Every structure is written in structure tokens, then in C-alpha cells.
Amino acid sequence: MKSAYLDAFSGLSGDMMIGALIDAGADPAGLERAVAALGLSGYRIAVGRRDLSGIAAVKFDVAVTEPQPERHLGEILAMIERARLAPRAERAAREIFQALAEAEAKVHRTTPDEVHFHEVGAVDSIIDIVGAAWALDQLGVADLIVSPLPAGNGFVRSRHGVIPVPAPATAELLAGFPIRIGDGAAEMVTPTGAAIVRALARPAPLPLAFEIERIGYGAGARTLADRPNVLRLLLGNVAAGFGADELIEISANIDDLNPQIFGYLGERLLAAGARDVTVTPTVMKKGRPGVILSVLAEPAARDRLARLIFAETTTIGLRFHPVARLKLARRMIEVETRFGKIRVKAAGAHHGAEPLNLAPEFDDCQKAAIEHDAPLKLVIEEALAAARRTLG
């Protein structure tokens, strides 16, 4: 399996993504067959080349030849299921549309099932999403990494009227991904491109050790004054290594707090953004037994978590210091067992690598064990076995 790095210096859209994947080796004829299986009508696909600043990039176009209905999430997911795509491609397409529906629902204060897909429910956007999912699977991409994204400037016209750039749904989808606010004179990332990133990609840790095998360029529709409007896709492998990040540790010695409060406090701290909370027995001055409360968190969360600790405990002072950590790349998969669906955390040297550790979600296993009156250890064992089969 391969990794793909999206060098999105000019942003990202569905057609740019497919163009880059075709340029990197995805079969255009196979893609068209996969799209035809959706049963859509009123469109025409064209694959050509466009020269931008001396870069010969693939331009993928979908011409809409008939009016298209507004579609709900359920209709689109049923269409994808009927197409009988390869399992990984089908799962990716479903996840992209699910991410998009959740973002639109949040913006419009409704539910994902009630969202009317307008621009992104049109035939060209459906083809972009399903085509990208199919091409990633065909190239064997298991790990999609994306550079910081230019957020753009100005306003665009949508079915709901004039909206700011980035569009509200795009902004929701890109939450948690590094963006460059104000970079670009127009809409640089479309909702389709943002949904692909949200569902399938992770931010690139920089510097990134990457072994390049092939490079693909996908052309956008506009001509930009300050940069070539292309998406560069690097296909290859992330060099073996560990992820790293910088956190802070907040700690306090406490010897006069009702111990029943610590469990409650831990839940509140995690809900407020703490990465980890531990309570360690210790012996304090004058031989008094106490505990050391330790909280790992992002530096930006320091004051928020400190206020919570001061409010919920008897401590009058906190210590904090920066900590560095090495970490395995983690992803959550959902597996089917005879006890139902169970989530399993898979951790490896990098995304797409063979997992070094598999950990079924304890709450899922406990719930399944109670519902099926089964031994908890058996549920955990079956979840692990199903995860190994899924990851092959």
C-alpha cells in the first residue's frame, strides 16, 4: 500500500484531485466505468491537459448536460451501494459524503439525513467524489497526507446566496487542519475538496520524510495571477519513523481532596481538551499520603484546564512545563463481529503501515458483552481477530 502527499499550494477541488490521480497513474477508462455503475445520467466526462506555468497538468472535466435533482444523503449512499465498487473505494466514498452531510447539517442547524445537497449533490460533484475514491483505491493509496491549505479570500455565490470564502461548510470540514487565512484571491478549497480531506486525509507533519515514486499534477479551472492553479500529488511511501509533537504537562500535589472527586475531574478535563489525565499516589511533606494530578494538553488549553482544576480541587498552585513525545500514527477502524460493530484503534509507524498495536474500544466491547450476555474477554478477542482480517 502507498502513501500520497497532496501538495496543495493552490488549494484543492474534486476535479483537481482526480486530475492529479490520473496523472500519477490511475486509469481514466476504469474510472469512467466505475462512475457509469452509479446509474447517473446527463453528464459527459473529458480528460485532457492544460499547461500552467510550464507544468503539463491533467484537466478532468464533467460537463452537465441535463438538469439534476436535489439529492439527500440516503439517495447518494444507495447509489454508491448499487454501483458495487471495490470495498475500500465504496467505504471512502461513503465516508466523504457522510463528512459533507455532517458539516452541512451543522451549518444549517439540521440533521445529516435532512440535508439537501445542492452544488455537491449535483452529478459533477458526485462523480468527483466517487472518482477520487476509486482512483485512490486503484493506486493502492492507504495513507493520504495534506499540506497546509490556502483559505482564500472574498465571496462566492451559492444556492443560498452570497457566502464568504471559505464557504461555511468548507470551514467546518477543515477544522483541525492547518490553513493559511487570507492566502489566495478567490475560493481556493471547494466543499468537495474539503470533504475528501476531512474523511480521508491527515495533516502533514513537517518536515516529512517521504520517498517519491511518482508525481501527478491536476489542473484547476481558473487562471491565478500569483501561482499555477495545480494540485501536486506525490505518490510513494512515508519513510519509517515516529510522529512527534509538543505538549505541556500540568501537575499538582493534592492531599486534602475527597478521592471520589478525581474520577469526575478526570472526565471533565478530558471533555475540556486534555490529552491524558493520571493520578499517582505519593507521600508528601510530614509523611502525609497524597496524589500527584498530571494532565497532558495542548499549550493553548493551559488556562482553560487550569481554571477547571482550581475550581474542582483544593490546590492553590499548579506547575506546568513543556514535554515532547514520540507517537505511533493512529486510526480508528470499525469491524463487524457476531456481537455487532466494534471500533478498534490501530497504531503503526505511519498511516497505512502494518499496525504494531491493536486496541478494541473498551466501551464498545463492554456494551456488546452485556447486550449478548457474553464474556468480555471473548468479545475483545473477536474484535482483535476481526481487525486483523480487515487490515489483512
Image (cartoon, rainbow, N blue to C red):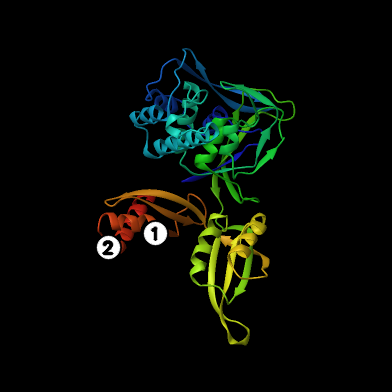
Task: Pinpoint residue 318: horizontal percent, then vertical percent.
Answer: 66, 68
The amino acid type, in three-letter code, at marker 2 is Pro
Q: Residue at x 50, y 41 (%)?
A: 200
- The quarter of the picture where residue 273 lies is bottom right
Q: What residue sits right under mark 2 in the picture? A: 375
Q: Against 255, is 364 above or below?
A: above
Farthest residue to the right: give it.
Answer: 226
Q: What residue sits right under mark 1 in the picture? A: 362
Q: Residue at x 35, y 49 (%)?
A: 335
Q: Residue at x 45, y 50 (%)?
A: 332
Farthest residue to the bottom: give it.
Answer: 286
Task: Pinpoint residue 348: horizontal percent, then vertical percent.
Answer: 48, 56
The amino acid type, in three-letter code, at marker 1 is Phe
Element under label 2? loop
Q: Is residue 251 left or right of residue 370?
A: right
The span from disc 2 to disc 1 (Cα, nearest Å) is 13 Å
Task: Pinpoint residue 310: horizontal percent, then vertical percent.
Answer: 63, 65
Q: Nearer the viewer, residue 164 or 198?
A: 164
* Res 191 label: none
Task: Pinpoint residue 366: horizontal percent, then vertical percent.
Answer: 34, 59
Q: Residues within 10 Å of mark 1 (few under 14, many from 20)?
A: some
Q: Is residue 23 visible?
A: no
Q: Residues within 10 Å of mark 2 (few under 14, many from 20)?
A: few
Q: Is residue 238 left or right of residue 381?
A: right
Q: Against 17, is 385 above or below?
A: below
Q: Nearer the viewer, residue 327 or 236?
A: 327
**Number of residue marks:** 2
